[in-house]
Image (cartoon, helix red, strand yellow):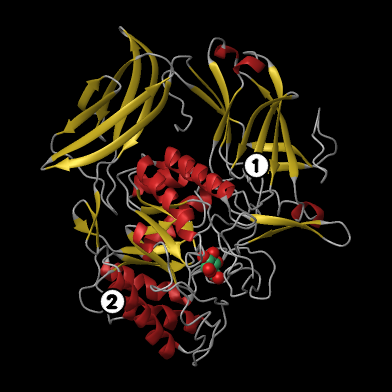
Amino acid sequence: MLKPKATATRELTSLDGVWRFAVGSTDGEPWRGPLDGTLEAAVPASYNDLFADPAIRDHVGWVWYQRTVRVPRGWAGERIFVRVEAATHTGKVYVDDQLVAEHVGGYTPFDADITDAVTAGGEFRLTIGVSNELTNTTIPPGSITVTADGRHQQKYLHDFYNYAGLARSVWLYCAPRVRISDITVVTDVDGSEGIVDYRVEATGTADVRVRLFDATGTEVAGGTGANGSLRVPEVTLWQPGKAYLYELVAEIVDGETVLDSYPLAVGVRTIEVRGTQFLINGEPFYFTGFGKHEDTPVRGKGHDNAFLVHDFQLMEWIGANSFRTSHYPYAEEVMDFADRHGVVVIDETAAVGLNLFIEGGVGRPDKRPTFSPETMNDQTREAHAQALRELIARDKNHPSVVMWCVANEPSSHEEGAREYFEPLVQLTRELDPTRPVTYASFMFVTPDNDRIADLFDVLGINRYHGWYVANGDLATAEIMLDAELTGWEKKYDKPIIMMEYGADTMPGLHSIWDIAWTEEYQTAFLDMHHRVFDRHEAMIGEHVWNFADFRTTNGVHRVDGNKKGVFTRERHPKNAAHALRARWHRIGNRKPTTPDTAS
Ligand code: BDP
């Protein structure tokens, strides 16, 4: 799926700004006409924290965004679209009173083709409905309960707050009738030459031409036809920490006339899992960094370019070479930024909480099986398959993306887990045969009871030794962690990445003892983990949970949200940030060959 861009043949206008806003009725009554009331909401932003009204923050169901849009008069004869980058979790787009698009899945974009409903130079009323409801057939899953006094309440199986709304940009754009509808690029290296295999899809039959330019704008390769393989002499590779991007310009031509043109950034690099190593460009790569969240004050999950730049600056400062898009696909601006700055990404679907065994990250066993016709069923799996299709369609061309993460903490030891996951892993491989596939396993899954680990290329594990177990007892936690890693290593000849390890920490709380929640404890906890990781051959990386503190749903295990951030929600460093900074700058992209004891 191509991101809307202004090109020689396409135009684009942003619809971001302040929109009229209204909360829908809980009985699902469809909206018609201009919105009532005086509320307004910022786009992009989650709506929940914009207002000072609990009825809006806790609302379950539809909300409505509305604004007037004028179509540029020069767009006559073009196809005209509205692109919604994220409507969390279900979106409906109306032109005046006509429904023109509907989409389920809150973190991937969709288009509404509005050509037949508008006129160039004319105005229309654009309304976007967004529902935040999660059920057992959505990804992520959830359920809605009705309280004794008739209020609808949204329950879900992840700890981060269920922010909703138009959290990313909305665009109006035009493209020619005969146009490029998709481009797929796969790169390889042959000696000093780079190989760029491309496939250009078009609406209707078309003559395709492609040219590849280096970063100075010099044409280095070219070809004709919808498929082909370009060879780049003396290629400069896209490397972690040292990004280099070519530009592939794909065109539909009619003789000398260019009917459509679309430029795509291309990084030439290879990825391979060999034995227990993860190779980027043939070199063993060790992941350092974080599981993150899209989460900032007031905006909720709303994309913000200032936080985008700042977060990447902080990751560079601390020496992180990578991150995971826990627990959903992030804004496309984030992926583009990672491409441009050589930051490695593990790209995850929103399949978080396929687990009735735990709820919201803490042990509260649910008696029902996770996988059954009444719980996570065939429809859930189909929604999950669709989430994978949309993630890969959107992100397949990003050189920064080195691995797909199919799910976070599924109940992979329960009956039905294999039947659920096997087709999804197969689908992922069909959609993208080039990238390794992983999942993040949860703490009660062991090498003996897990039913799916062999399906994956890399074992991603989330563990909380020293936090949810052996809290305040790092000596016991160290023994448990060591045994755990040994167990996975012995059973599978696969690379292991610690996808989550972290301790809640209240900034300003100090102790000379191992007391949970203190800044010293977070540092000691991380040090202990690093000591253990460095002893294990199969370890290929460490992603601390979490980059920053983030908002959660209410619960006794959370004080003002999840405090496992190495930075606060405002992005101030906790003490552990300095220790991590020392270690990660010391080790760079390579696994320490002897235990890194300086920390
Ligand atoms: C893990 C989840 C993560 C939670 C974390 C925690 O993957 O989303 O935030 O636990 O409890 O289980 O902090």
Residue 321 visible within the image: no
Q: Amino acid at mark 1?
A: Thr
Q: Nearer the viewer, residue 474 or 295?
A: 474
Q: Is residue 157 left or right of residue 247?
A: right
Mark nearer the N terminus (1 vs 2): 1
Image-quadrant location for residue 232: top left
Asked whether the viewer can see residue 62, the reply is: yes
Label 1, secondary structure: give it: strand
Q: Is mark 2 within 8 Å of ligand 1?
A: no
Q: Nearer the viewer, residue 302 or 476?
A: 476
Ligand 1 found in image quarter: bottom right
Which residue is most to the top? 255
Please name the residue shown 61% across and 54% down the image: 373
Q: Which mark is residue 534?
A: 2
Report if the beta carbon of the residue with label 1 is closer than 8 angstroms to ligand 1: no
On the image, which quarter does residue 34 sit in? top right
* Depth check, front residue: 412 or 369: 369
Residue furthest out toward the right: 149
Mark 2: which secondary structure?
A: helix
Q: Quadrant of the C terminus?
A: bottom left
Where is residue 297? Give x, y as percent. 63, 58
Q: Position of residue 486 (x, y in %)?
A: 31, 78
Is 456 placed left or right of 18 in the picture?
A: left
Residue 258 in picture, x, y percent from top left = 36, 13
Query: At 38% from the left edge and 76% from the top edge, which residue is drawn?
Result: 579
List the residue tagged with mark 1.
90
Instruction: Locate the N terminus by quadrant.
Output: top left
**Residue 290 is drawn in which quadrant?**
bottom left
Residue 283 image position (x, y, % from top left)? 19, 57
Q: In the drawing, does residue 133 fall left or right of residue 466?
A: right
Identity of the amino acid at label 2? Asp
Q: Is residue 362 left or right of residue 209?
A: right
